[in-house]
Every structure is written in structure tokens, then in C-alpha cells.
Amino acid sequence: MTLILPASPPATAKPLVLVVDDVPANVHVLATALRADYRIKVALDGATALEIANREGDQPDLILLDVMMPTMSGHDVLRRLREVDDTADIPVAFVTADTSQGGQVAGLKLGAFDYLTKPVDIPVLRTRVHNLIEQRRLQRQLRESELKLHAMLDSSMQFIGLLDTTGHVLHLNRQVHELLAQPLKSMLGLHFCELPLWTQPRQRTAVREAVERAAAGLASRFETRHTRPDGSTLVLDFSMRPILGEHGGVAFLLPEASDVTQQRAAEESIRHMANNDPLTGLPNRTLLADRVNQAVRAAERSKEPLALMFVDLDRFKYINDTLGHGVGDKLLKETARRLEASVRQSDTVARVGGDEFVVMLPETTVSGAIVVAEKVLANIGQACLIDQHELMVTPSIGIAMYPVDGRDFGALSKCADVAMYRAKHDGRNGYRFYTQEMHERSSRLLRMETLLRQAAARGELHLHYQPQIDLGSGRCVGVEALLRWNNPELGAISPAEFIPLAEETGLISQLGQWVLRHAVQQARRWLDDGVPFGVMAVNVSTIQLRQKDFMQTVADSLREAGLPSDRLELEMTESAAFGNAEAAVKLLDELHRSGVRISIDDFGTGYSSLSYLKRIHIDKLKIDRSFVRDLGQDSEGEDEAMVEAIIHMARSLKVTVIAEGVETLEQLESLRLRRCHEVQGYFFSRPLPPGELEAWLLRQAPGG
Ligand SMILES: Nc1nc2c(ncn2[C@@H]2O[C@@H]3COP(=O)(O)O[C@H]4[C@@H](O)[C@H](n5cnc6c(=O)[nH]c(N)nc65)O[C@@H]4COP(=O)(O)O[C@H]3[C@H]2O)c(=O)[nH]1
């Protein structure tokens, strides 16, 4: 910034005195008296005097002005000088023969600095001129320092003002006039709280208080929000301080403000990022926890209940995997929108995980929560069109109530989560309230998990084997290894209970390896002992199959036991075999080439595509128990049709077909009639410990 100061003569140059008088003799006297110490210019009339006074760059430091002049009197000259900014400050002393009091007063009123009477006393003239010039120098200095100060204030990025102790404006820097788009002059003298910056009564009150505090010697600081003419927001960090004078009292008040709009916006965006889910913009778990805990505190006071609702989209992963993340993301955004549309503004909808949303309903009873849950089910259940895909998704909802189920976010969310899993387990697309029974069940599962981790090491695991019978020959062609767990504390636990738990917790890999190794070793022993067991069928879960070293684990188990690979059959569910299509094709192909047989368990319950079936090598299809249950009864229902279709398809694909869960002669006959290859079930034998199975096999063998 350049600082422009009024032009002043070089410090070394002598001050300039303009002598104005229409009588040349008078001019001569004055000029002669002063010439030694000053530069002198003369004018014999008012017009010339004004012209010299206005000359830029060399203005007089003092004008000695005769009062009585023809055409333009000294008073007129002075009046004209004072009217123009550039000459208004030049000191003027009248030199006159008029010694009357009235004449002197009139001149002084016009702004004359001094009055000299003719005839002039030379020493007095010199002293007065010296004093007036010195005064002019000091005045200039003062003006310069004032300009420097203003220039400094104007160059600041801050909004700065100076007020008198009653709060009236003495100065405002350039930032302020630019912000308010008003010239400084129009605001000088106003009370600070009358500036157009303060648009709200609340702000004016705060400013008035700040003025009063500052006048009493105290500083104030607060933040204010304003709307700029273009509609954007301005946030000011405002302060008001007292400035003390020489004698220690408050002399001025200094209001200052800095523009913190960007800083506040950045802080806000950081806060938003820390508290919100970037995809949907909904509160994340951190913010939700905070809101729930706050709502709980409010509920404690108001004695109102509160509901926490976990909402999980059924089969979202499937959509995400098959249609891609782009579609998945849009679906999540749409879900967020629909959830928000299902609740009141005072409720909170948050996203806490992939497809997991949480809704907090303050001041809501069980019946209120039911209304919301049904609304959520209806809204989310509506078809939604995303990138030309018409998607139908349903939610599973778990609800926990404050205060019965918990008194903070941690406890309530655990309960709502458990209830949500129950809703899923019970067939999805529904809601469940958390109950004590769920609590017991989840504690049991927790305990079971701990014990299951130690089960193998403590020798609590065993394998039972169930024979598989060829209907043509009536002979045992295979045995299925089924895991058993006997724990001293929990007793005998069904695999239907602990296998899903092991899958959920990842323990299944360890258990699966244990089963594979032991089953393969048992097969080897039976082979050595000449026990005619056929093929050893081992169940493998999806999670095991997804493990990179699965193929290696199978190969190692076979090699360690020395079992020919065609004596091992791996049973996997449809979803395990077909879930992750390309990787599954590759693995099944590798297994097939190694000689291991592959059987698809629970066939008919999934969504296998037939074209896909043709691409992979399968040795056996197992018809699910649920289709076998009603076979052989008089009615020819859907199950018969299904069984018939599976058998037909298996035969045309040249794959062996086996039915499980055969309990009755009727079921057996029905399967035989439909030309099912093999059967397995209680009708022949329950799964048996190895010793008992050996005895069973030997009894069945020809001549046994
Ligand atoms: N009602 C009836 N049931 C019959 C009949 N015949 C056999 N079963 C039962 O049906 C289940 C057959 O196994 P799954 O379908 O593979 O179903 C198995 C399998 O999915 C899983 N499982 C068992 N052992 C293992 C294992 O070692 N690894 C893995 N991954 N899963 C296993 O646990 C499930 C349940 O196993 P189990 O309780 O042993 O139950 C076994 C067996 O005892 C019958 O005639 N009627």
C-alpha cells in the first residue's frame, strides 16, 4: 500500500510566508522584516493571494493578510481559503489598522490565527510569525501521524474502529466502510450500535453492553453472524477493549473484528466429517452415540421412554456383489432418504455400518415404535428403480426400549442388534423387540463361543458317520461325517446350533480343518481294516471354501493320511458353490482335477442357475430333507414335483442324485419309484460313532 501524504517543502527549505497587501510599501516593510528567516511571496490583491495559496507543491506556511483591500477584502480571502480543503488549514494572520474589538472578533471567527496591528512592531511581528509557523509545523506533523495511523488501520485485514467513551464513532477503518458500503463521513458520530452492521436487536443489545463494559475498563469478546448483501454468511469474531489515556482513565474504546467465516466453515466441515457418514450424510456412530446418550439424559428427567431401532437391509450384500458398488451406494442413499421420510424431524436416523442404519425415537413408547417400524417396512419395501434395475429390498428391524433394555447407547444398541438378528432369523422383512429370552440366548451364544474355541484342544469334538445307500445294489456307497460336540457345561450341542455360530465368528475354518483331517484319517483306517465304507463325505462351509489355502489344506490332509483323493467327497451348499461365481468355478475345477468328488448339499433350497450347473464339475446332488419329508403320502404335492424335477435334471446332467432325511418306507419307495440313485436317513441309520458304524457296515455286507 502506498501512503500519500500532502506535499510539504523539504525539511531544509525555509518556510514560505505570503504577504498580501494592496499597499506596496506595507508589503515591503513586512517582507524586509522577515526575509532573513523565511522565503517570501507577495500578492497585491486577494485573487493573486488565492492563486498562490492554491499552488500545489509550494503552499505558504503562513499568510499575512491585509484586511482592507479593494475588490476582495481580507475577510473574503480568508473565507475562500477555508472553503477549499487544500487551503483550509493554512494559518492566516490579519495585519490591519483596524484595532476595534469587533473587527478582530469577526476575523478570528472566520478562522484567522492571529491579529497584528499596523504599524507593525518588527520584533513582535517576528515572534508571532515564528510561533505561527511552528504551530503550522506541529499541526502538519500531527496530520501526518494521523494519516499514517489511518493508513496502518486501513492496511489491516481486521475491521477496526475507534469510539469515544460513550460509544460514538470517531473512526472506522477502510474494511468497515467497504463492508457496509458507506462512506466514513456518514457514520462518524453515530453510536456504534447504530451502524447498519448490527441488524438484529440481540446484536445491538450485545454491542451496547460491550460499550458499557469497555467504558468501565472491561473487555468483551463474542461471535456474530451476518448476512452479506449477496446472501452469503459472514462470521465475525468481535471484541471491544478500552484504551487508557495518559492519566490512566479510559480515553477511547477500540472495537475490532476479524472475519472467521472460512475458519468456522472449515471447522464445521471437519466436525461434519467426523460425525457424519460421507455417503448418505447421515450421522455416524459417534454422533449417534452422543445423541442417544443426550436423549437418555433428557428421558431420565422427563420419565419418557425412548426407542432405538436397528434397521438392516436383507440380502444387501447380494445386490452389492452382483450389481456392483455403484448400485449398492445409490440403494443406500435411497434407503437413507426413505428412513428419514418415515420418522419425525426430532428423531435421528444414522448409518453405522455397510447396510446398517439406526433410528432413535425419543419420547416413544412401544406402540409408537411399532407404528414407525411398520412405516419403515412399508417405505423400504417399495420397489426402487436404480440404473434401470428394479430392486426390491426388505429390512429387518430390531428394537430396544429405554429404560427396560438399557440405560445408555452401548447397552441399548447391543439389545437392538440382537433383536435385529432375531428378526432376520425369523424370516426377515419384519421387526422384533428385544426380550429377556433373547438376552439369555445371546449370553448362551457368547459362552458357547468361548467354550467352542477350546473344544478341539479339550477333546470334546467327535465325528459321527451316517451311511449313504445305493438304491440299485442296496449297498453302502459312502458315509457322511457329522461333527458332534459334548461339553461338560453345556452338554451335547447340536451342530445346527454351533456350526452357524462358528461360521459367524470365523471359528469354522479351524473346526473345518479338524473335521477334514479326522475324517480323512478315519477313512484311511477303515481302508486298511477292510471296512466297506465307500466314500467319505465331509461338509465344508462357504467360509472355508473362500479361504485361499483351502485347496492346500485338502491336499495336505489327503497326503498326511495317504488316502486316495477319489475316496473323499466334499459337501457344500449351493450358495457356497455358486456364490462368488468365478472364484468358485476355478476352485471346483481344481478340486475336480485333483480327483476329489463334489456334492451339492441341500439342493433345491437355493437359487442355482441351471446354466451355471453345466459349467462346473459336480459328482452328486443332494435333495434337501425338507422335500423328502412329505414324500410317499397320498397327496401329490409340490415336493413330489420338486424331487422328480431334481432327479430328472441330475440324470440328464449325468450326476448322481441322493436324497437325505429318509425316515420311512413310503419315502424310500417314492424315491425308488422316481429312480433316485442313493438315499440317506434314519430309516437306515442315524449318524453313528465310528465303532458302531463299523459294526453296522459289517452287518450289511454280504454274508454279514
Ligand atoms: N430329521 C432327520 N434328520 C436326519 C436324518 N438323517 C440324517 N439327519 C440329520 O441331517 C443332517 C445332515 O447334515 P446336513 O444337511 O449336512 O446338516 C448339517 C450340516 O449343515 C452341519 N454340520 C454337521 N457337521 C458339520 C461339519 O463337520 N462341518 C460343517 N461345515 N457343517 C456340519 O450341521 C447340520 C446338522 O447336522 P446334524 O445335526 O448332524 O444333522 C445331520 C443328520 O443327523 C433323518 O432321517 N431325519
Image (cartoon, rainbow, N blue to C red):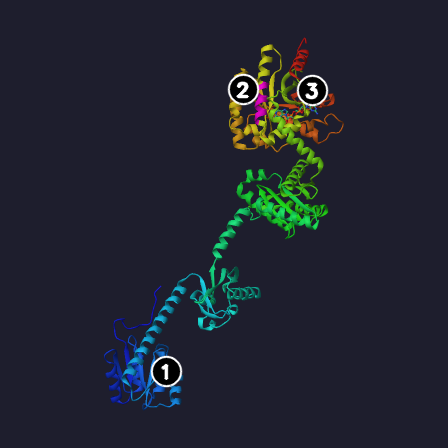
Residue 355, compared with residue 192, is above or below; it is above
Query: For the residue carrying disc 3, how many other residues have a C-alpha within 10 Å: few (<14), some (14-19), or many (20+)?
Result: some
At x 26%, y 86%, the residue is 27
Q: Residue at 62% across / 12% down in the picture?
A: 531
Q: Nearer the viewer, residue 165 or 513?
A: 165
Of residue 463 and residue 377, the one placed in the foreground of this image is 463
**Residue 507 visible somewhere in the drawing:** yes
User: Amino acid type of disc 2?
Assistant: Ser
User: Where is mark 3, residue-wise?
Assistant: 686
Distance from disc 3 to disc 1, alpha carbons, whole Å, reads 128 Å
**Distance between the alpha carbons at the discs numbered 2 and 1:** 118 Å
Asked if ligand 1 lies within 8 A of label 3, the reply is yes
| Disc 1 CB within 8 Å of nearest ligand 1 atom | no
Q: Is residue 517 magenta?
A: yes
- Does residue 395 appear in the picture of this structure? no
Label 3, label 2: how many angstroms apart (C-alpha)? 26 Å
| 212 in relation to 549, above or below | below
Q: Are marks 2 and 1 in contact (CB under 8 Å)?
A: no
Q: Quadrant of ligand 1?
A: top right
Foreground mark, 3 or 2, reads 2
Mark closest to the chain's N terminus, 3 or 1: 1
Residue farthest toward the right in the current orientation of the protein: 634
Per the image, label 1 sits on a secondary structure element best described as loop
CB of mark 3 within 8 Å of CB of mark 2? Answer: no
- Find disc 1 in the rendering and name its residue: 112
Earlier along the polypeptide chain: callout 2 or callout 1?
1
Is residue 251 part of the magenta span, yes or no? no
Region of the chain picked out in magenta, as a range: 509-519
